[in-house]
Image (cartoon, rainbow, N blue to C red):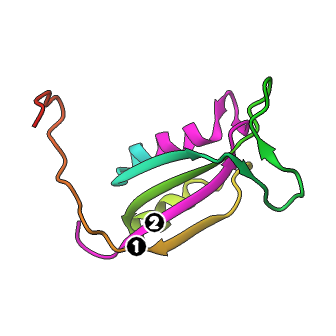
Amino acid sequence: MNGSIKLLRLYTDEGAYFGDQKVFEVVTTRARAAGVAGATVLQALVGFGHTPHLHRRHVLDDDQSVVIEILDEEAKLRAFVETLSDLEHLGPITLEAVEVLRWPLAKPTGDLSNG
């Protein structure tokens, strides 16, 4: 990785849909297609945002807040965010500097070795 690595965070709800697919799945699918370095989806135990509604897991309802974290170079992340303009159920999107202490090299696709 050359350049300045940044952390992009996107906030949404587990129950938010875009068509028949969950928003967090759409974002991660698009991130992979865009070739970003990596993405992780995290579920929050409890969260609230622009409304006073408290999001948490209920027995019959998936209402948790979800955070999607994506790492890559700043220019690539900014370009990726532009591809998300059609997603209505995204909350805040933040971009912050991070200090990368280790960046493992990618293994070739199809490599099934354990080392």
Q: Is residue 86 visible?
A: no
Q: Which residues are magenta?
A: 1-30
Q: Position of residue 34 (x, y in %)?
A: 40, 50
Judge from the rendering whether residue 72 lies leftward or rightward of residue 103; answer left or right. right
Secondary structure beneath label 1? loop
- Foreground residue among 21 and 55: 55
Q: Earlier in the sequence, mark 1 or mark 2?
A: 2
Residue type indicated by callout 1:
Val
Per the image, the residue denoted by label 1 is: 98
Question: Could you tell me if the residues under marks 1 and 2 are in contact, i.e. CB atoms within 8 Å?
Answer: yes
Q: Position of residue 103 (x, y in %)?
A: 23, 60
Q: State the quadrant of the C terminus.
A: top left
Q: State the quadrant of the N terminus.
A: bottom left
Residue type indicated by callout 2:
Leu
Judge from the rendering whether residue 24 lies leftward or rightward of residue 56; answer left or right. left
Residue 6 falls within the magenta-colored stretch: yes
Per the image, the residue denoted by label 2 is: 7
Q: Is residue 29 visible?
A: yes
Residue 31 falls within the magenta-colored stretch: no
